[in-house]
Amino acid sequence: MILGAHMSISGGVEKALERAAACRFRTTAMFVRNQVQWRAGPLTDQSAELFRDTRRKLGINPVVAHASYLVNLAGQDEVRDKSIRAMIEDLGRCGRLGIEYLVMHPGSNPDSRAGLAKIADALDSIFSAGPPGPMILLETTAGQGDCLGWQFEQLAEILARSKSGERLGICLDTCHVFAAGYDVRSAEGYARTIGQFNCVIGLDRLKAVHVNDSLKELASRVDRHAHIGKGKLGLAGIANFVRDSRLARLPFILETPKGADPNGRDYDRLNAAALRRLARRS
């Protein structure tokens, strides 16, 4: 299993790699700048070179960046324009760092049809204006509020509408698909869900997996992550993903809550150990 977790870039972008290696992770996810501000400080040539050198030394592969949480390509004009500029900036940073994938939430709009069209158009604008860089991965969402991307058909429509399909892929979040209403807890339910994904989108489009348990119930449409085996999705549901040989080549990224348990044990290490136990039982 190509296992990793989302790591902090506090102290420098290369620190995410060092933190991943300390947990024996083979891959990692990270932000490439402050995720809650539109403006970003400069990425210096020295920082980019240090990141690339650190990555070569540690062998972390692939690296999956995550776009700012402020980005909404389906939003109103001002927010959408800011989002396009932010994505162009993030693509450029990823290119300089040598990062393969940039994950983004598709966007939010109460009018789903109009929103999906705006997302596809914005993605084309981003790719045409931005430098060559990573593939953008549309993340499956829980469908909370007016968030788009909680149905496989919505993601497929974005891919079909965009003129830049070769630079687009999918990141599947296990918590999100469960909260969106896809019951993957049983072998039969999982087979049905992955079969539907393959039919509607295509497994060749799937490039990364966010592996999280769900704090909320099936079809709750609420995005709340839980520790592995401690939520409503449960070990059996997560095992279906971990043991699927078709997904073995993909990076599995933990986005479970950070911190330490009452005994002082790091949660990333505990969740990773739980996933490795599941994989060994296959």
Image (tube, rainbow, N blue to C red):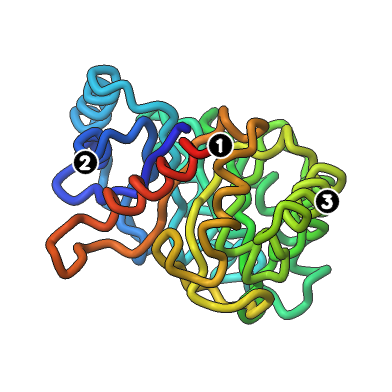
Identify which amino acid the numbered label 2 is placed on.
Answer: Arg
Question: If the image is split into quadrants, where does the C terminus sit?
Answer: top right
Residue lying at the far right of the rendered structure: 199
Eyeballing the image, is 122 above or below 62? below
Identity of the residue drawn at 67% across and 32% down: 246
Whether residue 31 appears in this view of the structure is no
Mark closer to the chain start, 1 or 3? 3
Give residue 192's position: percent from left, percent from top: 81, 53
Mark closer to the chain start, 1 or 2? 2
Q: Secondary structure at mark 1?
A: loop
Identity of the residue drawn at 28% across and 62% down: 258
User: Which label sits on residue 19?
Assistant: 2
Whole-Å distance between the Cαs marked 2 and 3? 36 Å
Mark closer to the chain start, 2 or 3? 2
Residue 75, by quadrant, is bottom right
For label 1, the residue is 282
Mark 1 closeness class: few <14, some 14–19, many ≥20 residues within 10 Å: few
Along the line of sight, the residue nearer the viewer: 27 or 33:
27
Give residue 180's position: percent from left, percent from top: 68, 70
Eyeballing the image, is 260 above or below 193? below
Which marked residue is nearer to the observer: mark 1 or mark 3?
Answer: 1
Whole-Å distance between the Cαs marked 1 and 3? 23 Å
User: Which label sits on residue 196?
Assistant: 3
Q: Secondary structure at mark 3?
A: helix
Identify which amino acid the numbered label 3 is placed on.
Answer: Gln
